[in-house]
Every structure is written in C-alpha cells, then in structure tokens.
Image (cartoon, grey):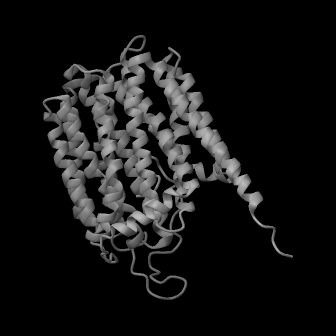
Amino acid sequence: MPSASTEAPTTVGATASAPATDSRDARGPRDSRMAPGGPGYRRMSFALFLAGVATFALLYSTQALLPLVSTDFGVSASEASWTVSAATGGLALFVLPMSALSERFGRRTLMTASLVVAVAVGLLVPFAPSIGALVALRAVQGAALAGLPASATAYLAEEVRPKALITAIGLFVAGNSVGGMSGRVITGWVAQEWGWRVAVGTIGVIAVACAVAFRLLLPAPRHFTPGSLRPRVLVRTVRNHLSNPLLRRLYAIGALFMMVFGGVYTVIGYRLTEAPFSLPQGIIGSIFLVYLVGTVSASTAGRLVGRLGRRGSLYLAGGTTASGLLLSLADSLPLVLLGLVLITAGFFAGHAVASSAVSHTAVRGRAQASALYQSAYYVGSSAGSTMGAVAFHAGGWGGTVVLGLLAVLGVVTITVLGSHAARVQSRRKPAPAH
C-alpha cells in the first residue's frame, strides 16, 4: 500500500500515457506487465478497489457506533473507544511483519489470507458478549488487516507498468476512502433501526462479498519472485530508516495528524447525541460524508507543495486543522460541521504531504519506510481514539479540542525544527570548487 494508505485519498488524475496496445517500453524489450486497457488491468483494479473497501469498512466499523456500544455494555466513552484503538493498534503492530511475510509467500496469497481472517472475525463481532471480548476480536481483526497495506503496493509495483502505477495505486486508495466513509454511514443508518450489532454484521456481510469478488477477480501474479525471510536484513533496514532524522520527523508528523483525526471522529458521535444537538444515529453516521473533503484536499497536495514547499504546506495544513478545532467548540451545528470540514481538509492534506515525503526521502527500502510510516500513523490513530475519549470524559468536547491543538502544536514544532536543521546542514556543506 502507498504511504498515504489509510483512508487518505491520493492523486488519481494522472493516467498512463502509454497505450495498452504498445507492449514495449521506450528501450524496446517487451513489457508483459498490465496497463490500462490491457488484459487483466480492469479486473485487477476492481479487485484491489474492493479489497480497500472491505479493509477500511471493517477497520472503522464501530467508530460511528460508540455511543450505542457504551449504552449496550454500560461503559464510558474511553472504554468503548478501545474497539477502535485495538483494531488500528493491531494493524500498526503487524504491518511491518506482514510486509516481510508477503516477500516469502506472495502478495496475493497474503492479501487473501488477511481478508479471510478479518472477515471471519467480522462475522463474530456482532456476537461479542462483553466489551472485553469485543476489544479482543477487534484487535485480531486489525492485525489480520495489516496484510492488505503490506502487500497491495508491492503487488502493483510488480504487476503494473510504471507509467500506470500511480493510477492503479490511486484506485486502491480510493477504495480505502470509500470503505472508511461508507462503512460509517451504513452502520449509522442501520444501527438507528436495528442496533449496533446488526450494523457491524451488515458490514461483515458486505466484506464477505468484497473478499470473494477480490479473490475471483485478482489476476495471478506473473512477476513475483519469492524471497527468504531474513530478519537481520529487515532489522538493518528498519534501523537505517529510524536513524534518519527527516524520516523520524515525518513519522511523528503523520502520527500527530492522525491523533487529531482519530480523537475527533471517535468522540464526535458522543457530542452530537448530547444537547443542544441531540441528533439521531443515522444523521451522525452521515457526518462522515465530510470525508469527501479529504479527497479534494489530498488530491491538491501536490500543487500545494509546488507553491509553498513541503514545510509551508505542513504549516497551512496545521493551521487549517487548528482553525477547525476552534470552530467546533461552537454550539451551532453549521459551525461544528464547518469545523469538521476544516479538520478533515487539514488532516488529509498534511497526511498526503508527509507520506509522499517518506517515499521521496527513502532511497533504499521504500517498502519498509512506508510500512514504518503506516505503523506510526495507526499508532497515532489508536492513541488519538483512546486519549480523545479520555479527554472528552474528563473535560467534554473542549478537552478533546485541547488534545487536538496540542497535537497540531507538535506538528508545527517538528516542522520548525526541521527547517532549522535544514538551514544548519546547508551551512555545513562545502562550497563548490571553482
């Protein structure tokens, strides 16, 4: 999966410039990999789109339902939030090991196994007898889903021609966004009529259909070469990435942005069920349609960086997010919604800038660099979900906003330190010889 693989959209406007009938690259040798219009490309694209839908519909299936989960089990918002944190935390912990397993057993095999386990667990989730059992099931589900982002991008890089790769990855990430959004919206309306258990069961059934279609449609890999599991090589690559100050800053920025986003969208349902809003569950689920704003902000991130530079773009993303947090304090529904729009736009833009910078910065071991970013990203999601709920329990919505503002301040501080480090490094460079 790309470094922007989460629910963040990517730029999908770039299309392959090579016609499908041209099976040779500029240097002459035949290229048997897939391209738009060619054999298997549409099947592959639709299969991975469905995998993305299933992954993120399952991953965040309980987020819009937390008030109902709290009521059913008689637990607080912070306890119920663990049904989200456990899933994202499991994914964060297992995405790097899964990337190594895909090198040995194959991308399609691992993606299929991951979906099968995640879907099976998803069908058990509605029958959880206690909050502890529900959290445990969600943790297993998140760990299983780690096999999708660990393998999808590698599959595409091996099976799709380079000029078509951006478009192919964009379709997969679009599936992530659609799954994350539609899963929350569907569960909100279904739960309003039949309760949260039927709602998550509905997502499980949808995921079964997506998983079956994925396995039937995805072409068998033709260019995969199995490798050996070499822990020493993996550890050395990870250590090298973590020793890079710029990558460390980018990982922290991704985690902090996601901490804001995870905290806000975990708690917003509780805020909107209370006075003065008192909205029904279906309407609260529909609030997640705001995710569509992220599609626009992330798709324009490239142009934003071109005008403002990476650091300028991060400052703008942080300022937009902070403005949204402050607006959301109002007791006016239109202002709260505008605040959510700004938070969402700022988050997705900042995430797109940081994640793309990871791929640009890592010269070697880009897959592991991306996996580390995803780990940090989902650690931020897990921490934000839990800490945002704790802050809400302690200080209401204002407590969650303060937590978000502190995270944004962290983004700005890290960016300022990065600018200072870049200036210091440029001064140390020897003058060119004349």
Point out the residue furthest to the bottom here: 28
> Which quadrant would the N terminus be assigned to in this image?
bottom left
Instruction: Give percent across and percent down for residue 52.
Output: 34, 52
Q: Quick one: 127 or 428, which is closer to the camera?
A: 428
Indicate left or right for 239 with 144 as reference: right
Image quadrant assignment for residue 227: bottom left
Note whether residue 253 is visible.
yes
Task: Give the answer, above or below, for where 324 lies relative to 227.
Answer: above
Q: How many marks?
A: 0
Q: Specify the quadrant of the image occupied by residue 274.
A: top left
The spot of residue 28 in percent (x, y) is: 51, 88
Q: Residue pushed farthest right?
A: 434
Q: Quadrant of the C terminus?
A: bottom right
Examine the image and state in which quarter residue 410 appears.
top right
Q: Is residue 351 above or below residue 336?
A: below
Residue at image location 49% in from the left, 75% down from the top: 19
Q: Position of residue 306 (x, y in %)?
A: 67, 54
* 45 vs 267: above or below: below
Identify which residue is drawn at 49% across, 27% down. Answer: 403
Of residues 27 and 236, the one nearer the viewer is 236
Does residue 357 appear left or right of residue 44 in this picture? right
* Residue displayed at 35% across by 65% down: 42
Q: Residue furthest top?
A: 276
Percent position (x, y) of residue 202? 21, 38
Does residue 2 appear in this view? no
